[in-house]
Amino acid sequence: MAPLTYRKTVFFLGLAGLLFSGYLSAFKLFNDACALNEPCPYFLGISACWYGFGMFLVIFSAAILSFFKVISIRSLALVSTFVSFLGIVFAGSFTIPEIGNMLSGIAPRYALGLPSCAYGLVFYTLVFILSLLYLKKNKN
């Protein structure tokens, strides 16, 4: 993947994740309830969407810094790989039990078909795969 294509793709995936998690976080902040009529997963007493917002903010910020040559594209790939891996572990730890509950019929119906954490997991996985591929292709 060409450097500019990689940079743009991570930028847009980061932006999409940031907007989605930002919506969930803002809804939680202003309504004291989770968006999309879902149960709210918590980690250490804080809504999971806030952690997602923070991780997507790091990925998005790194992409912007890379566009302006404040950090190298390799640094973008390293940061994106690390943060998206954390995001996969984090979102996956909420998504897997929720999907299991869906399959067993004890989970609520989700407004978007799947729990919101599952969509974060998809974005993190895409960023992770693209970043690993970029690092593998551009080893120096």
Image (cartoon, grey):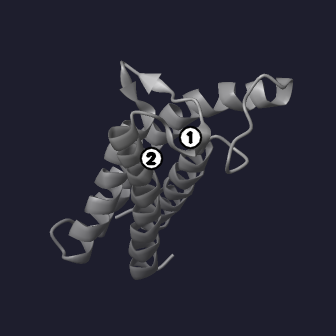
Between residue 89 and residue 120, name the one nearer to us.
120
Image x and y of residue 140, in percent: 34, 64
Tell me: residue 56, above or below residue 89: below
Asked whether residue 32 appears in the rendered view, the answer is yes
Asked whether residue 83 appears in the rendered view, the answer is no
Q: Amino acid at mark 2?
A: Leu
Image x and y of residue 30, in percent: 34, 43
Find residue 87 and name its label: none
The residue that appears at 34% across and 56% down in the rendered structure is 59
Image x and y of residue 95, in percent: 62, 33
The residue that appears at 33% across and 61% down in the rendered structure is 60
Find residue 117 and name its label: 1
Between residue 39 and residue 116, name the one nearer to us.
39
Q: Secondary structure at mark 2?
A: helix
Image x and y of residue 42, in percent: 45, 24
- Report whether 66 appears left or right of 25: left
Q: Amino acid at mark 1?
A: Cys
Q: Residues within 10 Å of mark 2 (few under 14, many from 20)?
A: many
Find residue 24 and name its label: 2
The residue that appears at 69% across and 41% down in the rendered structure is 110
Between residue 8 and residue 25, name the one nearer to us.
25
The numbered mark, 1 or 2, whose residue comes first in the sequence reads 2
Tell me: residue 69, above or below residue 51: below
Tell me: residue 135, above or below residue 94: below
